[in-house]
Image (cartoon, grey):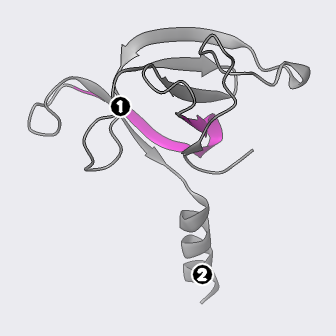
């Protein structure tokens, strides 16, 4: 497991992610034509979201070797947002715990 959002490139020729089936990971849902916006950056070109029993994986439809993944344990907050002042279209808002966050919080706790 990698803590936080990370690049994902373990993608089969048909554009689907290779799952860790040996450890029980299963595909639960596929959502096509999904945009991905990270922070204040412009949205990525459309892609496909794969929700598994362990993580959320987004794979670009235009660059089949480009993707991102996040394990569920790293998602600290999620909500559906329909506020056009927050984002121009309805979206799922998430906050992701990263390795840097853990280090920073650990330092705050230790000092």
Q: Is residue 25 magenta?
A: no
Rounded to the nearest angstrom, the CA distance separating label 2 from label 1 is 29 Å
Q: Which residues are magenta?
A: 67-81
**Residue appearing at x 78%, y 20% in the figure:** 25
* 46 up-or-down from 86: above or below: above
In contact (CB < 8 Å): disc 2 and disc 1: no
Rendered location of residue 76, percent (x, y) = 51, 45
Residue 109 versus residue 64 in the image, above or below = below
Q: Label 1, on which residue?
A: 79
> Does residue 47 lie above or below 107 as drawn?
above
- Name the disc covering residue 107, or none: 2
The C terminus is located in which quarter?
bottom right
At mark 2, the secondary structure is helix
Nearest to the observer: residue 22 or residue 48:
48
Say whether residue 71 is magenta: yes
The location of residue 97, given as percent across then percent down, is: 54, 53
Marking on residue 25 = none
Horizontal placement of 61 versus 93: left or right? Answer: right
Q: Residue 19 or 62: which is nearer the viewer?
A: 62
Q: Is residue 95 above or below residue 99?
A: above
């Amino acid at each position: 497991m990698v803590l936080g959002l990370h690049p994902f490139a373990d993608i089969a020729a048909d554009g689907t992610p290779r799952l860790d089936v040996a450890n029980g990971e299963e595909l639960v849902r596929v959502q096509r034509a999904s945009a991905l916006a990270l922070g204040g950056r412009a949205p990525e070109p459309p892609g496909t979201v794969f929700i598994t029993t362990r993580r959320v994986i987004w794979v670009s439809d235009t660059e089949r070797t480009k993707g991102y993944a996040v394990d569920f344990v790293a998602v600290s907050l999620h909500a559906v947002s329909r506020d056009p002042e927050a984002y121009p279209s309805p979206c799922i808002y998430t906050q992701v715990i990263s390795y840097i966050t853990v280090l920073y919080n650990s330092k705050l706790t230790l000092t």
